[in-house]
Image (tube, grey):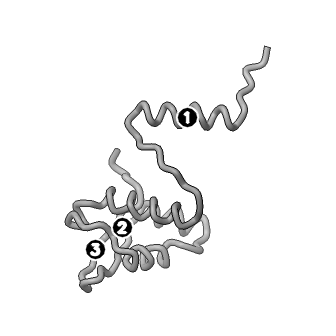
Amino acid sequence: MSNYQSESELEKSLISQMVADGYAKVEINNIDDLYENFRKQISKHNINELKGKELSKSEFERLCLKIEGKTENMSARLLRELIDIQRDDNSKVYIELLNKRD
């Protein structure tokens, strides 16, 4: 007997488990939704560095310019580093893409 599970079944199971673990389910219908969710998640992850103020759209665009179009090695390095972003008020903030502590 096979224990085959389709990709769709695996995805549904994973989503159910993550929701049970406290993650929020997010509806992503297009690229704009994907970018908006990424902006919100990065802002949430860096809330202390951002002093409670989410990245604006223009600040997020500056971040995307720094991280898009990189090689695998460059992308891997960016995931481990702090990325400096100029805020709309001309201050500088350092953004972490991944939580390296937990």
Q: Quadrant of residue 93?
A: bottom left
Residue placed under numbered mark 3 in the picture = 93
The one nearer the camera, 75 or 43, is 43
Q: Position of residue 46 (x, y in %)?
A: 30, 61
Relative to residue 38, is residue 4 depicted above or below?
A: above
Neighbours of disc 2 within 10 Å: few (<14), some (14-19), many (20+)? some
Counting from the top left corner in percent of width and height, residue 40 is at 38, 61
The residues tagged by marks 1 and 2 sit, at their Cα atoms, a distance apart of: 30 Å
Q: Indicate the amino acid at tag 1.
A: Leu
Coordinates of residue 67 in the picture (x, y in percent): 50, 72
Q: Residue at x 34, y 67 (%)?
A: 95
Q: Are marks 3 and 1 in contact (CB under 8 Å)?
A: no
4 with respect to 67 (left or right): right
Please rate how many residues cluster around mark 3, counting C-alpha atoms within 10 Å: few if below 14, some from 14 to 19, many from 20.
Answer: some
Q: What type is the residue that disc 2 sits on?
A: Leu
The image quadrant of residue 80 is bottom left
Where is 91 relative to 30, above or below? below
Position of residue 24 measured from the top left corner of the image (x, y, whole percent): 41, 43
Nearest the eye: 23 or 98: 23
- Would you call the spot at circle 1 few (<14 residues within 10 Å), some (14-19), or many (20 or more)? few
Q: Amino acid at mark 3?
A: Val
Upstream in the sequence, badge 1 or badge 2? 1
Q: Which residue is mark 2?
A: 82
Choose between 17 and 100: the one closer to the eye.
17
Q: Nearer the viewer, mark 1 or mark 2?
A: 1
